[in-house]
Image (cartoon, rainbow, N blue to C red):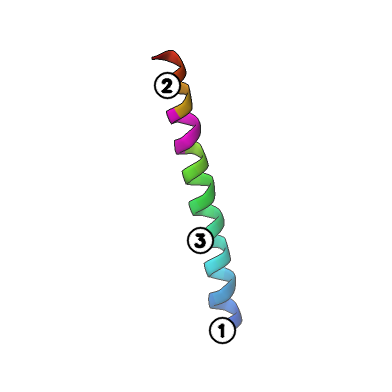
Amino acid sequence: MLRASYKWLKVKDKLNLSQTSKKTISNIKNNDSG
């Protein structure tokens, strides 16, 4: 049970990381064009 939740936490972390990186990339692009 604990292992499964731990795996899920890792997956959530990866998802959050990818989302934040996408946001940063879009922000940088917006700053460049501005």
For disc 1, the neighbor class at 10 Å (few under 14, some 14 to 19, many from 20) is few
* Residue 12 circle label: 3
Instruction: Please indicate whether residue 31 sits to the left or right of residue 25 in the image.
Output: left
Q: Secondary structure under badge 1?
A: helix
Tell me how many marks there are.
3
Q: Which residues are magenta?
A: 23-27
13 above or below 28? below
Quadrant including the N terminus:
bottom right
Instruction: Please indicate whether residue 33 sits to the left or right of residue 3 in the image.
Output: left
* Residue 31 circle label: 2
State the separation of the CA atoms marked 1 and 3: 15 Å
> Marks 2 and 3: CB-CB under 8 Å?
no
Closer-to-camera residue (34/4): 34
Where does the image place residue 13, in percent across and percent down from the top left? 53, 59
Choose top left, top right, bottom left or bottom right for residue 3: bottom right
Q: Secondary structure under badge 2?
A: helix
Where does the image place residue 7, in percent across and percent down from the top left? 59, 71
At a point 56% along the width and 55% down the height, the residue shown is 14
- The type of residue carrying mark 3 is Lys
Main secondary structure found in the magenta portion: helix
Choose top left, top right, bottom left or bottom right for residue 2: bottom right
9 above or below 16? below
